[in-house]
Amino acid sequence: MQGPIEVLGELSNLNRRGHWYFALKDESSVLSCVLWRSDAARVDFEPTDGQEVLVSGRVSHWVPGGRTQFYVTSMKRKGLGTLEERFQALCLELRQAGYFDEARKKRLPAFPRRIAVVTSASGAAIEDVRRTAASRLPGVELLVVDVRVQGETAAPEIARAIDRLDAAAEQLGIDAILVTRGGGSREDLWAFNERVVADAAYRCRTPLVAAIGHEVDTSVIELIADLRASTPTQAAVHLVPDATELRAQVDYLADRLRTGLQTRMNALRQRFELAPRTLERALRGALDRRRLRVAELTTALESNRPSARVSAARARVQALHGRLGAATTARLRQATARLEAGKRQLESVGPRAVLARGYAWTLDDSGGLVRSIEDVPVGARLTTILGDGRLQSTVEARQGRADVDQTSPQE
């Protein structure tokens, strides 16, 4: 075919090691291309996978390799490719919705017991993860969840695996989830840019690490994950602690603990050794202060000795003591006399004196005082108390006040 040909397509799998090897693709086809180093030096922009470019060149067949490819002589940028446009649009939408916020990202477990790895069980990524985890800390268990990592059904499978693992994380003892796969073209990695995968990663409550493709590749799930690793190996390094480093850290902490304890013991021993002398100085100081106080009080007492006042006070006390004794005796006699007079007066009006004058009082059979003839019926038993004893009687008849007034007691 003669003359230059122009082809419009999306860059994919660009490899710029000296000569540029890449593919141009559209929705239905892929064209293998090469751009020699001398021609590549004239390209005035930095091409990346996903860009839509217009290239000019010719088609030729390389006989030794049995390959027909497009030899590019010039390249011009035409704007973002279809996949890149979709990627940028989804990133903008998710960023505005808070999917990429650093504040919502969770801290990775320091010492995970079990890590769930969502990847292809037959891919190279899982072997890198297994090898790295085994070399760092063999006790960490890997639970591999086999999913498709490219193709139309890959995204739903990945999202479903994340949701199920997160829901059963406590039951399965899962401390973290790693979603990973090896490198590939933008279209090979596209499953990890689908909205269904983004939503599953955003919902995930278990710490999530994503390592998709190579270091230059960036996918939506990596932007949402709690940690993005450049490769599957790096993801395993971030998740699995290094046993050698742990041992070194334990040794370091043990040394610090021993040093701290030794320092503390030395300080306590020094305080213990100094304690007797410190106590002796404290007691001696306290004793000296008390001696000084006693001396001060003795001096004050000697300078104000109250000998005369004490003698006068003693004489006054003795005089008051004599007066108090006389007054007390007189008051006691007066009180005794008043008491005897009161006793005699009380006895003269007491019930015994009344009874002695010939009076009596009558009680019914219940011991109550009879005040009226109405209080007892005929036939009731009565007790009459006199000055020298009591009488028992039975009521045979009752007479009113008029009948009683007609009779008078015999003197």
Image (cartoon, grey):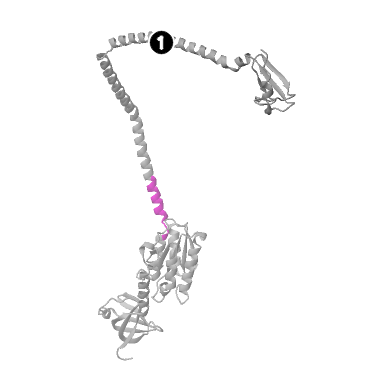
Which amino acid lies under the numbered mark 1 shown in the image of this protein?
Answer: Ala
Residue 357 visible in the displayed image: yes
204 or 332, which lies in front?
332
| Position in image of residue 227 (x %, y %) | 39, 63
Image quarter in which the N terminus is found = bottom left
Task: Give the residue number, with chain letter if any, for mark 1.
Answer: 327
The extreme front residue here reads 406
| Position in image of residue 383 (x %, y %) | 69, 21
Say left or right for 317 vs 121: left
Q: Which stretch is magenta?
A: 239-254
Circle 1: is it few (<14), some (14-19), or many (20+) Cα within 10 Å? Answer: few
Tell me which corner region of the image, top left, top right, bottom left or bottom right, holds residue 99. bottom left
Number of numbered discs:
1
Label 1's element? helix
| Position in image of residue 257 (x %, y %) | 38, 44
Residue 122 visible in the displayed image: no
